[in-house]
Amino acid sequence: LRRCSSLALSLVTLSVSMWLSTIATHGWAAAAAPSATAAAPGSATVRHIRRVAMDVALADEVERRRNLAIISHPDAGKTTLTEKLLLYGGAISQAGAVKAKGEQRRATSDFMELEQQRGISISSTVLSYEYDGKQVNVLDTPGHQDFSEDTYRTLAAADNAVMLVDAAKGLEPQTRKLFEVARLRRLPLFTFVNKLDRPSLSPYELIDQIEAEFGISCCPLLWPVGSGDRFRGVLERGARRVHLFARGERGKKAEEAAVVSLDDDRLEALIGDGELYAQLIDDVEMLDGLTDPLDLDRLKRGEQTPVLFGSAMTNFGVQLLLDTLMSLGSPPTPRALDAGDEAGFTSGELTGDEETVEPTSEDFSGFVFKLQANTDPKHRDRIAYVRVCSGRFEKGLKVKHSRLRGQQLTLAQAQTLLGAERSTLDGTSYPGDVVGIPFSPGQMAIGDTLYTGSRRISFAKIPSFSPEIFARCINPTPSKYKSFNKGIEQLLNEGAVQQLLERGDTGGGVPILAAVGPLQLEVVSSRLSSEYSVEVQYEMMPQTQARWAMAGWEEVDAVLSERKLLNVKTLEDVYGRPVLLFTSGWTLDNAVAEVGERLQLRPYALAPDVQERRRKK
C-alpha cells in the first residue's frame, strides 16, 4: 500500500505540473480542453510517466533492503545466530548445528567439508530471504583471525553490522579488530550479547566494556531478566513489556510463554522469582536515568549502538533482534568511487569528500567482493559474488568491466544464493542484493566493478592483507600434475591465499603460497585433497613480512646493486611485480627507513587493470 501511495502521489504531482505548464503556455482554455491531458501511447508524456513510475519502484525496492554482516570472536555463537535468523525469517524450517550429531542437520552457512569437521566458519557466506516485507541479505563471516581478509571483504559489501559478544567472556581480541573495520566503514552497528542461558557477566559490566574500549554510546533495547539457569526472558524497553520464554525443542523456535506489560500485576508471579523481579524494577529505573536515548542519526554515523541481550542457542530474543534490524537497519547507501590513489586507500571509509553513486541511480553498478570455486564440485564451477550497488540487475544484462577497460560482458547466467544452495535468478535484483555470477578463469578478481552507462566507473578497491606466513607448496605425485595446477589456480583466483613466484618463473616452478595465518594453508591442503584428490606438502620459509615494491624491478635492481637491501628475498607476484620478503620486523623497518619511499613499498597491491599489465610487459 505504501509503495502504491508513493507511485500515485508522484503521478498526481506530475499531472498537476503538466497542467500548470499548459496554462502558462496556452492559457486556461487550452488547459480545460480534453486534449490537454490526453497523451498518445509512446508520446513523451507517457514515457515520462513510465520513467517516474520506474524510479519510484526502484526507490521502494532499495528502501526495503536490509543487508547485514555478523562479526564476532570465534565461538561467540555467530553461525548459530545466523541459523536462527534464517529460522525466524522462514528461510529454513529447522536450524542446523555447528557440530551436528546424529540426525541434526548441518548449519546452512557452513557447507565446506573442513568447516563441518572443525565446527568453525572459514569462508564468508551469503544467505538471502524475505521477512516482514523486507528483503534480507545476511553475510556470515569467519571469526578466526586467519580469515580476517575474507571478513574485511564481506564488510565492504554490508550496510549494517551485528557485533556478537559472548556474555560470559565480554569483548575478545578478534571482536576488537573487527569492530575497528566496521567503524572505518561507518556501518550502523547493532550489538547482540549472546549466551545469556549460561552464567554471565553483569550486563552493566558488558556495556561499560563496550563504551570504554570502543568509545561508542550504548543504548540497551533488550535487557535480560536473569542469566544462566535463571534466565527468564528479556525486557523490551521501548514498549515497556517483558517477553518471557520457554525453552523450545533444539533447532525449533522458542516458545514465548507470555508477553506482559511492565506494569502488569501478574509479572512477578509469571517470572516466578521475587529477587529477579525486584532486580528488573531497579534496572528499569537505573537505565532510564543513566543511558542515552536512541538517536537514529548517531546510529547511522556509527556513534551509538543498540544493545540487545539474548541466547541464540535457546532462541531467546532472536526474533526481537530480527525485528529491530528491520525497523532500525539502514537500507543500501551511496558507494564511494575510487579516487585513484592506491597508496592512500585504507578502508573505504566515507569522509564526505568522495564522489559517490546513489543506489537509486538508473544505471546498474556492482562490485565483486568474493570468489568461490567448487560450490558444486561435480562441475568445477567458479562463482563471483557481486553486490548490486545501483540500478537493476536481470539475467542476460550486458555490463562493462572496469578493470578490463570497459570490455562488455553478457551475464547470461545469474544465481541467487543461500549458503551452498543456488537457484537460477528469474526476477530482478536491486541495490543491496548479492548475485552469483559464473565466470571464466581470469575474468573476475576481487574488487572488480561492473557497470552500465557511458561513463567508466570503479568503486573503491578492496586490498589484500599483507601475508605473514610463506610456504612452498610441493606436489609429491607427478601424475597429479594437472589436477594440482588446476586446484592451485582456482583456489588462488578466489583469494584463499596469494601466490608468489621466483623471479623469472614462467609457471614451471614450485608455487610459493603467502597467507595471513597457518589455518589458511590448512584450508588449501584440505580442499586440494577433497576437491581435486591431490595431497600436498609444505616447506615453510623463514620470512614473516612482505612488501610490494610498486616502483618496479628497475628501481629494485638499483637498490640491490647499492647493497641497501640486505637479508631480503626478492620474489614476484602473478602480475610480475616485485615483492620483498623480510625475516623480521627490524629488517623491514630498516628497509622502509632506508629505501621505502624510493621503492614505494606497500603492504598490499591491487589487481592492475589491463592497460597497466600490458605496459609492464
Image: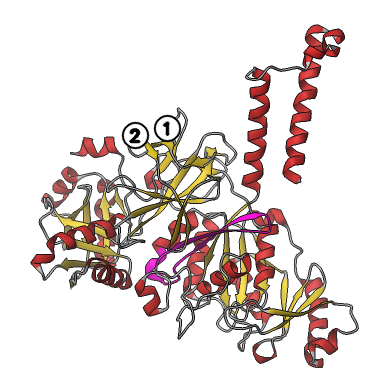
Q: Which colour scheme is used?
A: secondary structure
Q: In this view, does 547 lie to the left or right of 13?
A: left
Q: Per the image, is 210 magenta?
A: no
Helix, strand or loop at mark 1: loop
Does residue 207 lie above or below 216 as drawn? below
Task: Tell me residue 308's x, y (percent).
Answer: 67, 72
- Give the image quarter of residue 604: bottom left
**Residue at figure coordinates x 49%, y 81% from the top left:** 104
Q: Which residue is drawn at 67% across and 30% down?
A: 52
Q: How crowded is mark 1: few (under 14 residues within 10 Å), some or many (20 or more)?
A: some
Mark sitting earlier along the chain (2/1): 2
Q: Do the residues labelled 2 and 1 touch (CB within 8 Å)?
A: yes
Q: Which three-letter amino acid code belongs to the residue tagged 2?
A: Arg
Q: Name the residue under label 2.
A: 405
**Circle 2: is it few (<14), some (14-19), or many (20+) Cα within 10 Å?**
few
* Residue of label 1: 456
Relative placement, left or right, of 122 versus 533 is: right
Q: Position of residue 316 (x, y in %)?
A: 66, 78
- Picture coordinates of residue 578, whole percent (x, y): 21, 50
Determine whether, in the image, residue 347 is placed left or right of residue 326.
Answer: left
Q: How far apart are marks 2 and 1 (CA)?
A: 8 Å
Q: What stretch is highlighted in magenta?
A: 123-148
